[in-house]
Amino acid sequence: MVLALLVALSFPQTGTVHLPSGPIEVSSELRLPEGAHDLIISGDHTVLRASASFHGRAVLSCKACRRLTFRNFAIDGNRAALEKPLPLPDGDKAFSKFYPNNGILIEEADGVEMDHIDFTNIANFAILVNHSHDVFLDHISVENSGSRNAKGRNNTTGGILLEQGTNTFTVADSVFRNIRGNAVWNHSYNESPRNRGGKIANNKFFEIGRDAIQVGHATEVVVVGNTGNRIGFPVDLVDVEGLGIPVGIDTGGNVDHSTYEGNHFEEVDGKCIDLDGFHDGTVRSNTCLNRGKPEDYLYGNFGIAMNNANAGMHSQNILIENNHLEGMKFGGIFALGEGHKIINNRMLHLNTAHCNETHAKFGCLAIAGEPGFLESGIYLAKGGERPGPARNIIIQGNVISGYKMKAHCIESAPSVKLADNTIQGNRCVDE
């Protein structure tokens, strides 16, 4: 059976391959012919299972393929036998050149569709796409996947990664459960083309060790209608040494003209939405709800936080409106930069840690000389990784409630003037 499968996958440049039903053990990488085109690979209750002696970058791979379709089969990566402790790749090395034992690897392709593919026990990435165009991933299921580093922390692996300038992509209507690293993300190094024209929509996330979604070094990406529960759990998987604090929707690199809208997350041990590198975009009608005690969120943080670590961007012109943030360990929004609009948001039950009265227990006085940092509903900062004082920001029509929020509703760093911003019509309530 394995020989027949190898023959079927090794020779066709075009046409349809019908995978046989049932489990099929795979001991080495099944490489489609480079440049294969107009090819459909379809299963019928087929499970491709990596053997204990499997050797290869992925169970299935293809380079420079065009108009390639996968549908209706499963891949079992045999993680128990194949997982090895691995760090993040050094320098600017692509993830596709570093991590072995993935599910499906696509490189430099144009026109790839995957529909109803189920992944389980994948040692590293379920799907890894490098520098490709027109990639559409629908009804994907990924469970119990990802490896760890030498300290037993997650090393980002487990989910779907689109890297190094992948354009026009969709990840939709898919389910991710028990993923050690990031569930869905795109990533490019600074010297690489940015990812462009993506949509991450209507996916469901459960028990994710790092980020449910990360938009990295990209433009024109829409993140809409996703739901998640227990992001940043189990706690011992969090890559605290590598500063991989969990996030519902994370951002990295230089990201603009993008929209995060209508997403709902519950029980996030980290930040709900991180806007490090995000500018000239919209964050609208998202919900983040934590119901537990502050002790339940070891890495609990702000609901929405801006930053400017990437030297190629400036935090500017972000519309943050109609979001609902509830039960945050610290504040609702950490803001820096200029030209933002923070309007009509509901931020309830903030500062469950009761900063600064519990500074010894929760590290509330994290920045010397800035006592308002973690006790305020909205904090106007002097900058993040780089200087970027909050100014010319409209803060209007927000409801902000929580521990001593009347006194600490909107505060700023000592070098930032509240008067340099427009603050009006906000309702600040103690709980």
Image (cartoon, helix red, strand yellow):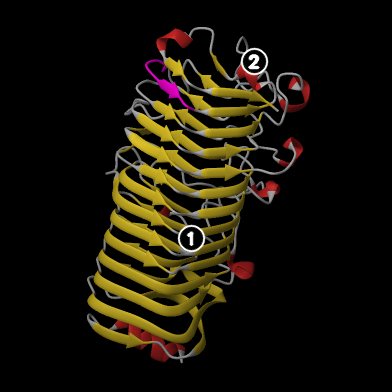
Residue under the point 33% across and 47% down: 221
**What's under tag 1, amino acid-wise?**
Phe
Secondary structure type for disc 1: loop
Residue 270: give its label.
none
**What's under tag 2, amino acid-wise?**
Ala
Residue under the point 63% across and 23% down: 374
Horizontal and vertical percent for residue 10?
Answer: 32, 82
Horizontal and vertical percent for residue 411?
Answer: 56, 15
Choose the circle earlier in sequence order: 1 or 2.
1
Question: Which quadrant, please, contains the C terminus?
Answer: top right
Horizontal and vertical percent for residue 82?
Answer: 58, 67
Label 2: which residue?
407
Q: Is residue 246 above or below residue 356?
A: below
Label 1: which residue?
125
Residue 247 seen in the current view: no
Residue under the point 66% across and 50% down: 233
Horizontal and vertical percent for residue 55?
Answer: 49, 70
